[in-house]
Amino acid sequence: MTLKRTNKSSDQGIALISVLWGVLVLSLIAMTVLALARVNSHLAKNMIEQEKANAASEAALYEVIRRLSSPSEGREIKPVVGTTTVNFEGYTIEVAIEPERGKIDLNSADPLLISAALAYRGMEEDEALDMAAHIAELRENSPEKVFRVVSDLLQKADIPENIYHCAAPFFTVYTGVIGVDHLAATEEIKELLQWADKKRWGGRNWMEISGTSSGGLVSEATNSVVQNSISHSGRVYTLIARVKSQKGGFLQKRAIVRLTGNRKEPFWVYAWRAEFSRESECSQK
């Protein structure tokens, strides 16, 4: 009798341990499922928020294009660097307006401007002058426009990537002018021009500002336009919409557009892309 009781107690103990293990395994599975559900819910929420921010930045770009294209509202916006705000679905979006005339055109600019921009962003001075001469040679030997987009510098001029990413904001391919319109330039480009003037880059006095876009390295061709009622028709702008992101930093959407003045086709899009704005790692000399 004692032996039977012992075996029975042992069987009951094993059964209890098995049940406890089963409960533990089921609990772990349940906790894992709940954790995954929370993660998926968080990811879905982030994706929805990201899409809302993306839609808000898109709407802001279209709204600024509408304002610039409007005969009445367009007069209130001068063709110089500036910012405007757009409110959309609870978002306040800041949109930067950068006229392309304030940048260095790779297809037409004086090679000294190109070399100065490259040197300012870290390229050795002799190398920068050689690179600008190479770009000028490419232009002379081509019956067509050499640079269709600024990123063509990477393939056609074989410029180092680190220099390209830092110098790219100085360049454009849409104006067809020799110099830079000082009134339409960003603060970064103005700092570049001051640096080149201080160094007398190329033996030139950079800040002898011409009143037209055809003379000198730097002009104030926009000045006469600013003083009068203006139309933005035919002008090319970079528009940058910035929306604060949950990850820190900003969701940034950049568009390059030409305003046509045509009601049926009020603008042409040269570029339209999203990018995540981070602190710049570029340095200058």
Image (cartoon, rainbow, N blue to C red):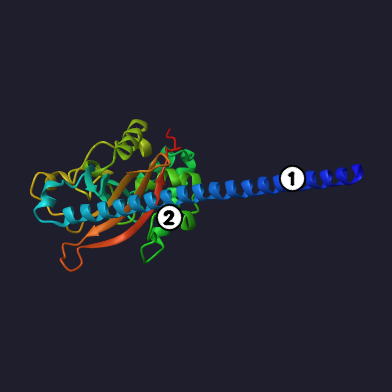
Three-letter code, disc 2:
Ser
Q: State the image quarter where residue 280 is shown.
A: top left
Element type at mark 2:
loop
Direction from residue 68 to residue 143 in the image, left or right: right
| Res 25 visible | yes
59 in relation to 122, above or below: below
Question: What's the mark number on residue 151?
Answer: 2
**Image quarter (top left, top right, bottom left or bottom right) of the N terminus:** top right
Q: What whole-number distance in Å separates the C-alpha atoms at marks 1 and 2? A: 70 Å
Residues at circles 1 and 2 in contact by the CB criterion of under 8 Å: no
Spot the residue most to the bottom: 264
Q: Which corner quadrant of the image does residue 96 belong to?
A: top left
User: What is the crowding at mark 2: few (fewer than 14 residues within 10 Å), some, or many (at least 20)?
Assistant: some
Viewer can see residue 176: no
Left or right: 240 with respect to 152?
Answer: left
Residue found at x 46% / y 47%: 42
Q: Nearer the viewer, residue 151 or 75?
A: 75
Q: Label 1: few (<14), some or many (≥20) within 10 Å?
A: few
Choose mark 1 or mark 2, whichever is in front. 1
Residue receiving disc 1: 16
Q: Which mark is residue 263?
A: none
Tell me the residue at 22%/39% (across/down): 209
Q: Name the spot of residue 54 as percent of width and height, x first.
A: 34, 52
